[in-house]
Amino acid sequence: MSTSALKDSVLSHLKYSLGKDPEHATTYDWRVALSLAARDRIVDPWFESTRATYRADAKRVYYLSMEFLIGRLLEDALVNTGVYDDAKAVFDDLGLNFGEILHDEPDAALGNGGLGRLAACFLESLSTLGIPAMGYGIRYEHGLFRQRFEGGRQVEEAEDWLTQEHVWEFERPEAAFEIGFGGQVYENGGRAVWRPQEAVIAQAFDTPVVGWKGEWANTLRLWGALPKTVLDLQRFNAGDYAAAAEPEALARTISRVLYPDDTTEEGKHLRLKQEYFFTAASLRDLIRRFEAEHDDLRDLPKRVAIQLNDTHPAIAGPELVRILHDERGMEFETAMEIARGCLNYTNHTLLPEALERWSDGLMGYLLPRHLQLIERIDTAHQTQHPGIAIREHGEVKMGELSFIMANRVNGVSALHSDLMKVTVFKDLHDMHPDRIVNQTNGVTPRRWLRTCNPRLSGLITDAIGDGWIKDAERLSELEPHVNDAGFLDRFVQAKRENKVDLGQWIAESMGISVDPDAMFDVQIKRIHEYKRQHLNILETIALWQEMRDNPNGDWTPRVKIFGGKAAPGYVFAKEIIYLINSVASVINNDPVTSKWLKVVYPANYNVTLAERLIPAANLSEQISTAGKEASGTGNMKFALNGALTIGTLDGANVEIREHVGADNFFLFGMTAEEVMERRTVEGHAWDAISKDPRLARAVDALRNGTFAGGDHDRFRGIADNISGPDYFLVASDFSDYWRASREVDQAFRDTGHWARMAALNTARSGWFSSDRTIRSYASEIWDALPSKPLRNIAAE
Ligand code: AZC
C-alpha cells in the first residue's frame, strides 16, 4: 500500500466516519480515523482466513479465557500489516505528532496479569501461525481498576475504557444466545430438563486479531450481557421507574466488571455467573458453527479443540455433557467421551487459595442441573479410580473437575508442571500418568520486541535480516555479532537511547530526575507476597544505609523501578506499595545518596507502561520464592530486550537460565526443595536476621519510623511478618540476594562485558516466543495444523 493511498483512507475516514475536516480534527479524531484505515486492511485477510478454514474443514482451536489483557491495538496492527512507516510518514506530512496519536488509545485492560496477557500473546501467535482459532471471553465495561497513589497509598478508580468508541470491534447482534440461571430440574420421559428461573442474553462483539504480515487473522469474540427485556413496562406504567429499569441493570452487571484479583478466589455469586455466562455462550456458538457444516456431534473432537485457561471456564465440562446428554439425547458415557475429547485445561498456579472451589449451595442454586451432573461425573470417575473426589466438604473443586474432564492438562513451565505432579494434582496424576504435559509459556516477539523496541529491533534486522520476527529462534544468528565491537556499541547505544526516553518520561510525569547511565533495575508485576517486592525494597534500604555509612564509596548507580497493582482487598500487598512509596520519598530526597540511588514507582502499571519500561531495563528482578511463580512471562520479555535477570530458580527462570547460559544470569536463593525444608525450621526468620547485621538494620528501619516520619507503627506489620512467620522466606533469602546484587553491581561496571551478556540474552531468548509455545500446544494437545498461509498483505 502506498503512503498516499493510506493518507486517502485516513482522510476519508476522518470525513465520512467521523464527520470532521482536518482543520477541526482532534487527536482523538485522527487516532480513530487511522485505526479505521488500519482496520480496513485487516478485514480482507480476516474474511479469507475464515473462508480458508471452512474450505479446508480445518480443526479449530477455541481458547476460553476470563481475561484477555490486549492493551493497545493500533500500533501492533500497523506493524503487523506493514504500514507503520507509511502511517508515520502520513502524519509527519500532515504536521501532526504521530507518537501523540498512538498514545491517545486507551489500554484495554481486560485482565489482571500474566494469565490474561498470555491469552493475548497466544491469539497473536495463533494468527501469525495461521491456525484457525477463536478467543472467547467477556467484554467487560470496566476493565482492571486504574491505580493512583494518594500519600503513597494505592487508590482504585473505575476504568472506563469503553466510554470512547472501541474502534476495533464489530458488534454482532445476530450472534446472541439466551443464558439461564437458577430454577429447577424436571424429569420428562426419562430425561432431565432444566428450567432456569432467570435469563440474560449474551451478545457477541468481534475483534479481528491480525498476525505478522497480515497473512492471517483470527477473532477475539467477547460476550456482552444484555437483558431479555429492557424495561419492565408494567412497573414503568405504574410509576415505579427504578424497579422498571431493574432487569436491564441486573443483566448488565454480568459483563460490568473484571474481578480485580488474580490469586484469591472471589467467593462471589456474580463471579460464578460470569464464568457460566461466557462459557455457555461460547459452547453454544461453537456447536452452532460445527453443526452448520457437520451433522454428527460425535465428530466434535475431530474438529474442535477447547482450551480452558485456568479453571474459570471449568463449567464447560458439565455444560457440554448437559447439552449432549440432556438436550441431544446421547448416552451419558458418550457425552462424557466427546466432552473429554475436546477439552483441555491449563493450570497457572499452585497457590491453594487460587484454586477455585464453589459451595454446593451456590452451585446448586445457580446451576442446579450442573451440580447433578458433577455428582454423576464424580461417581463415574470414582468407580473407575477410587480415592479422589471432585466434591469435598460441601464444595465443588474446579481444579479436580477440570482435570477429570480434560484430555490434556498442562502446566506453564517445566518446574511448575513437575510440581503439579507431586503437589496439587498428585493423586490425579498417579491415576492418569499421561495426562499432564508441560507447555512452557512464551511471549509474542512482534509486540514485545519488534513494536515496543524499534531501536533494538532495527539493529537486529540490520545484522541478520527480519526473519527473526516470524521465527524468533533465528535470533541465535546474532551470536557471532556479539563478538563484534561495532555491533555491541550499537546495542549499548540503543539501550541507552531507550533509557534516555524513559528518563525523560519519569522526569516529566513524576518530577524525579534519573541518570541514564545508572543501572535501570526493574520489578514490574502484580504486587504479591510470593513475588517478594518487599525483598527488593529491603535490599534497597540496606544499600541506602551502606551508602550513607560510606558516602565516599565507589557505588554503582542504580535506579530501582517498581510497577504493579495490588488486589483491592489484599491488605499486606497494599502495605508493600505504601512502603515502597515511602522509601522512595525518603531516598529520592537524600542529597547524600542522590547520585547513586533513586526509587521510582509510576502508578497504574499496565501493558502500555510495560512497553515503555522493558526496552529500557538493564536488570530484571524475578525474585519470587522458589516453587511459587508458575512461570512468569515478564522475565521472558526482559531477556528478549537485552536485560539481565537476577532471579531464583522458580518458574520459567530455570529455563531462561538454561537458554541464556548460567554466566549471563544472576542466580540466588533457595531451590523449591530447600524452601520446603527451610519452612520446617523453627524460627527460620529470626535465625536469618541474627546472622546478617545488614538485614537486621534494614528491618529495624521499618520499626523505628525512618520511612514513616517517626511513626514506629506504620510498617510494623511488614517488619513483624518478615521477622516472624515469613512464609515467603524473605529473611532467609536476603543474604544471598544481597550477594548477587553486589555481583550485579560489579558486572555492570565492566560495560563491555555487560553489553556482551545483555546481547547474548537477546540472541538466546528466541525459544521464549509464544509461536514456539503455540506450535507445541498444536501438536501435543490440540492436534491442530496451521492452514495454508494466505497472501502477505504487508508486501502489497
Ligand atoms: C499467572 C502466573 O502467576 C504466572 O506465573 C504465569 O506466567 C501466568 O499466569 C501465565 O501462565 N497466573 C495468573 O495470572 N493468575 C492466576 C489466577 O493464576
Image (tube, rainbow, N blue to C red):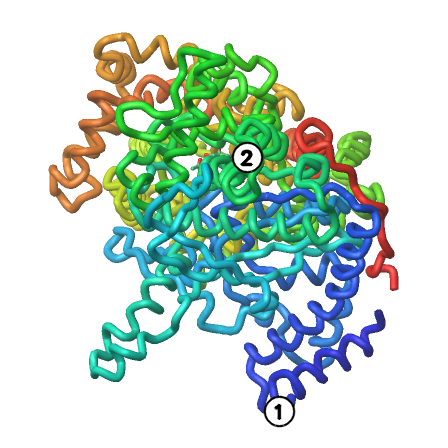
The type of residue carrying mark 2 is Asn
Marks 2 and 1, the one that precedes in the sequence: 1
Query: Residue at (30%, 30%) from the top-left corner?
Result: 395
Q: Secondary structure at mark 1?
A: helix
Outermost residue toward the front in this view = 189
C-alpha span from label 2 to label 1? 45 Å
Query: In the rendered image, which residue does mark 1 sit on?
Result: 23
Q: Secondary structure at mark 2?
A: helix
Query: Residue at (77%, 53%) from the top-left corner?
Result: 216
Direction from residue 785 to residue 125 in the image, left or right: left
- Answer with the quarter of the image where residue 47 lies: bottom right
Direction from residue 785 to residue 754 in the image, left or right: left
Q: Nearer the viewer, residue 621 or 541?
A: 621
The location of residue 764, given as percent across then percent down, is 70, 30
Determine crowd level at label 2: few under 14, some 14-19, many 20+ residues with C-alpha closer than 10 A: many
Query: Residue at (48%, 51%) from the top-left corner?
Result: 278
Rendered-image quadrant of the N terminus: bottom right
Q: Is residue 623 above or below residue 144?
A: above
Query: In the rendered image, which residue does mark 2 sit on?
Result: 635
Residue 361 in view, yes or no:
yes
Residue 544 in view, yes or no:
no
Determine crowd level at label 1: few under 14, some 14-19, many 20+ residues with C-alpha closer than 10 A: few
The location of residue 60, given as percent across then percent down, is 70, 44
